[in-house]
Image (cartoon, helix red, strand yellow):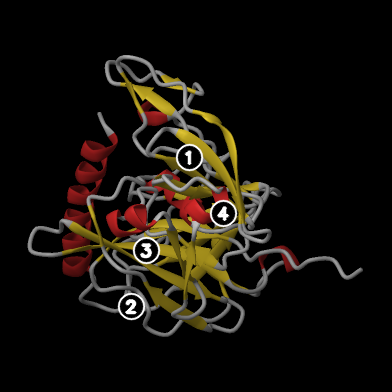
Amino acid sequence: MTFLSRTRAGLAGGVLLAVALLAAGCGDEPSAAGPTESASPSSAATDGYWLLRFNTAEGADGEESRAVLVRYDPGTGAAQVRRLPGVLAGDAYADQQALLLSADHAWSLLDTRVADADAKAGRVTLYAVDGEGQRAVPVRTWSGQPGLVPAAAAFDPENPSLLRVVDSANRVWKVDLGKEKATQDGTLPLKDGWIFGNGFDKNTGEPYVESIDSDETVPAGNGDSDLRPVRRQGGTLLSYDGTPVEGLPEMPCGFAGGFTTKAGETWLFCADTPSIRAYRVEKGGSTWKQVGTPSRDVVPGVASELAVVLPPVPEAPVS
């Protein structure tokens, strides 16, 4: 399955999920719930603003997807919302969407595919997570290549200043946002029967090419057959599709996303009502504990998935 067909298939499924949630969400209680208790936020590593990325299905046939970014602090209930411009038939599927967010949670891309207007201008546009600002990154100028046309881009999962860009000639560029410089980092190994589908390794941010006849990729292990979890900050993202999750107690809600920390503690963010509620369970635990204070009403009414949940960015050590 190609990136485009997979994206459309996921979008269609998301539309059905959104309709089902609207139908099931008429009351105040979640449609499914396991045992829960109350708890206070646990550790400094999980205190502060979590970053959640919702995807919506909009348009007459759900053909347009829009990212709605929510910064939510379970300890206080505070929440900030950033609605990004819509994207038609985006190329970044759910697991790759964490690469659309900078490691410091400051900036977001719309998609791995660079918009046509940006490509023609030789730039990549970044969107501020906290506020309404934008930043145009002039890759063509910074590279010193007058004919450069950026085709795809993704953030490095660890370095907030590093953006990787693949141009129309399949050259890979490392773009340093701090030094305002783009340096070539090789060329994609394309050959007959292979394509670059705007795909980047979800855990390294490196671009990869894929065979049109099989699931083979270079580097290996990416694409449709990639079952690895998305890893960030020592933990893994939890994708929840409504089915039981091995090793976890029954979910307290039917629409959620989460994150498992390095210590094995799992955080879950329920979004089957207009407000977000946070829960956590220790490794091997049997009961979800509700944490802190629910947010104000911030969940998009046409949310099709909660694709990304990232823990607070660790504070830099004081020198």
Q: Reply above or below: 223 against 287.
A: above
Circle on res. 142: 4
Residue at the location (41% across, 37% down)? 199
In the displayed structure image, the side of residue 119 where residue 291 appears, left or right: right
Using the image, tell me which numbered label, if any, was put on residue 274. 2
Q: Label 1 belongs to which residue?
A: 246
Q: Residue furthest front?
A: 146
Task: Estimate the x, y position of residue 118 in percent, counting from the top left.
Answer: 35, 58
Q: How far apart are the two marked residues, 1 and 2, measured between alpha carbons?
A: 27 Å
Q: Under tag 3, what secondary structure? A: strand
Local packing at callout 3 (Cα closer than 10 Å; few below 14, some 14-19, many 20+) is many
Rendered image quadrant of residue 63: bottom left
Task: Determine which residue is flagged by label 3.
Answer: 54
Relative to 30, does residue 154 appear above or below in the rendering? above
Q: Amino acid at mark 2?
A: Pro
Q: Secondary structure at mark 2?
A: loop
Q: Regarding mark 1 in the picture, which secondary structure is present there?
A: loop
Q: Earlier in the sequence, mark 4 or mark 3?
A: 3
How far is the residue under mark 4 from the one under mark 3?
A: 33 Å
Mark with earlier residue (2, 3): 3
Q: Nearer the viewer, mark 2 or mark 3?
A: 3
Q: Position of residue 170 (x, y in %)?
A: 43, 32
Quarter of the image where the N terminus is located: top left
